Image (tube, coloured by chain):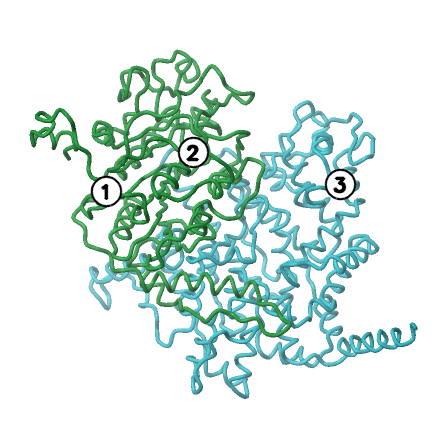
Amino acid sequence: MFRPLLAGLAGSLAFVSIAIAAPMGLDDARHLLNRTGFGAPPRQVAEFARFSREQAVDRLLASARTTPVAPPPSLDYIRPNRLKDLSEEDKKAFLRAEFEKGAELRAWWLQEMLQSPSPLTERMTLFWHNHFVSSQQKVKAQRLMVEQNLLLRRYALGNFGELLHAVSKDPAMLIYLDNANSRRGQPNENFAREVMELFTLGEGHYGEQDIKEAARAFTGWSFEPETGDFRWRPMIHDAEPKSVLGQRGNFDGDDVLDILLQQPAAAEFIVGKLWREFVSPTPEAGEVKRIAVTFRDSRYELRPVLRALLLSPAFWARENRGVLVKSPVDLVVGSLRTLEVPVPDALPLAFAVRNLGQDLFAPPNVKGWPGGEAWINSTTLLGRKQFVERLLRNDDFVTPPVRADGIGMSYEEGVQKNRMRVKELREEFGKGAGRLDGDARLRMVRALDGLRFDSRRWLAQFPDDAAVARALLAVPAVDPPAAGTQGIALVRALALDPAYQLR
Amino acid sequence: MTTRREFLQAAGVAATLGVVPWPACAAADWKRLLILVELKGGNDGLNTVVPFANAAYARLRPRIGMARDAVLQLDAGTGLHPSLAPLMPLWQGEELAVVQSVGYPQPNLSHFRSIEIWDTASKSDQYLREGWLARAFAAEAPPRRFVADGVVIGAADLGPLTGARAVAMTGPDQFQRLARLAQAHEALQATSGRSVNPALQHLLAIEGDVASAAVRISAAPVLRTAFPAGAFGDAVKSACEVAGGGRGVAALRLSLSGFDTHHNQSNTHANLLRQLAEGLVALRAGLTELGRWNDTLVMTYAEFGRRPRENQSGGTDHGTAAPHFVLGGCVRGGLYGEVPKLDRLDGNGNLPFSIDYRSLYATVLEKWWGVSANAVLGGKFAAMDWVRG
């Protein structure tokens, strides 16, 4: 009775393994690169099309990085409450400088996403930023946000257990979740709650009492306000016995994190989140359990998990193509990479993604950006289409920046033109962009001017219109362009189609 | 600006009849507009509608409390913050209702969670995704010819309109300009054996709402009313432009931000209340110019009030119950609800509520629009009496 069943099973397993071993072709290559990176230039898609799925996935994992290509802006650490000592004048100047530094920081990370030989590393860094959330709005010291970003990248495709231990002591995190001041006798529960609810187990796998006890264990993990470094404060640590998730002992913070990592729920929780990042909005319970076993067996090494996810049937299934909504970063960085637009200065992109709802280094709350359909509302949809349209306009879409110095045009004309630019900037890039002062604004305008799409060179890479459509869209266009649409008009029609908003 | 009372007195009507006839208040239906004004951050109600005669008030707020002779008296024990002076003619004209001690059971002190509760009309431990207005419009839809069921001015977050046929904009002209990028598409059909891509469906629904609003929205009417400078003044102007556009809309939502006054609140709060009052008065003037004041209801709301006891930094922490304002040509002005019970603070030092916020919503649904409220609000909440006619 079992023979036909086994034969059938062997047959389908053989089919699956053939699929994994054969050259995957352009569609699969585009799918893999868009899901693991941010868009992909056509020549890279063509290169990957020759690999088998297994070869491609192994190649992507092997080229993962632990450090950025370009070093981050060098920022001095500024201690908390620095503002208190300043006069009104100085306070304004200080805040303005902080605002511009913040823009630089975001521009740096976006440039890393554009340039990195391993976009997967940056995607995972961003994934962890949205998981182990800290926000510059509360942390304030930008230097600490940079340090946290570097930490997340260091462990991005490494070991989840090590990442958890490291980020729990990260100064930005200690400030963000109020553990820095948590002390024996008055433990602050914020970090204990979020580490269970949002970072490791998810709701339903712990109780209020576990949170209270764990909070006691985390006391003593603090930081030094003068330098911004982690500081262990034994005097405020509660060293008494605690009971957490059925275990009892004189636990410290590291002990509690180890207890959390022992729970079966932890692996499934993380795999579920990775599924929603890479595969689809609806994890398949059986597959998640299977891959979670891999995760636990590898002692929380992330590469084997990613390998299992990216080679799972669900990842490649037809019905899971184009089911994820592009985040603002996916849309902006992905468009520029796919269309091979050089970006000498990423400053405008920092404002662009923020205006579309994704302010890097400042997720809205400890749950992070909800993502998925939440990226799309009437305002953001128009903003996203406006960004694409700006990138793909035929002509010189911006009035060239002017120095209102009377040379080439009258001073009044120059001032008038620049006033229009501020209005334009504010409308397209949000209130923040309108706040930039003279030099920064000029830089912004110049950087925008520098974003030029060379439609002729790009289109020459494709044999026909169908190939162009397949390069840009994860699913067929909702309103395919009229026959005969050519050149940049074709690209524009496809990029403004609803299907372009998906990956 | 003359109040209705002054005008009628001047016309000699009140004197002869001894009775002051009210404007004909329209029947409850979709011709009536709701304008919600969100006081983002949690307005300090206690310094807005001040129990100035209560000794506990002075004790709890030695530094930031409002002086007795500074407030604008509404009655023997209650007065308004002086920055709200522009609203006094509305109070005297009986077009301003002050609903005191609005809140809900088991109040949540997180901005994020509490505004979610107010927006979705949920219980404190219940998580709903749709806004209460979306549920109301799903049960009884406003006319299809409307620009949209609801329009949010300023913010991109739809709040109580989440899930409704609603769009966000800074103003009709800007929206028209941008909305040319949106197109209506055919609805997706499921092909055999395969379900429709939910993400794509969502995209098409949103784009459809934008496209349909773009087609229906008219250019902004030119108004003579002067609107205050600043973001809230701009939003009020846009609200009038949308309200005055031909096709109609059921609800508008505006926001005024900055009310999370943890530190040194006195000047900040005074400034915000001034913006609010000036904005509301301009809103009245603009709507009157459009002939819409008598069919518009304006209502404030916020995630919570603030703690009665001032903190160490000259500000206030997150609180619970707070007063809210309801205004309109067909609003029955006066004081509603109970004065803040400063002697009955809870374990966190916060005020009990006397009016559940869902009663305000029930009043809008049942008395203003004449639609049923229980299913929308998940239960029966007593409608209040501040709608005339």
Which element is circle 1 on? helix
Question: Are the residues under marks 2 and 3 on the same chain?
Answer: no
Q: Left or right: where does residue B100 sit relative to residue A314?
A: left
Residue B296, picture quadrant:
top left
**Looking at the rendering, in which quadrant would you find the N terminus of chain B?**
top left
Which residue is depicted at the point 29% across and 26% down? B334
**Disc 2 to disc 3, how far (Cα)?**
46 Å
Q: Give the answer, above or below, for where A34 lies relative to A460.
A: above
Mark 1 closeness class: few <14, some 14–19, many ≥20 residues within 10 Å: many
Residue type marked 3: Leu
Looking at the rendering, which quadrant does residue B314 occupy?
top left
| Labels 2 & 3 near each other (Cβ < 8 A) | no
Q: Name the residue under label 3.
A: A257
Q: Mark 2 points at which residue?
A: B359
Q: Which chain is rendered cyan in the image?
A: A
User: In this view of the protein, which residue sits in the foreground, A1 or A92?
Assistant: A1
Instruction: Tell me which corner region of the image, top left, top right, bottom left or bottom right, holds residue A446.
Output: bottom left
Q: Residue furthest top?
A: B55
Q: Is residue B94 left or right of residue A221?
A: left
Of circles 3 and 1, which is in front?
Answer: 1
The residue singled out by tag 1 in the image is: B293
Q: Distance between the residues labelled 3 and 1?
A: 60 Å
User: What is the spatial separation of the Cα atoms under label 1 and label 2, in whole angstroms?
Assistant: 23 Å
Colour of chain B as rendered: green
Say if labels 1 and 2 share a chain.
yes
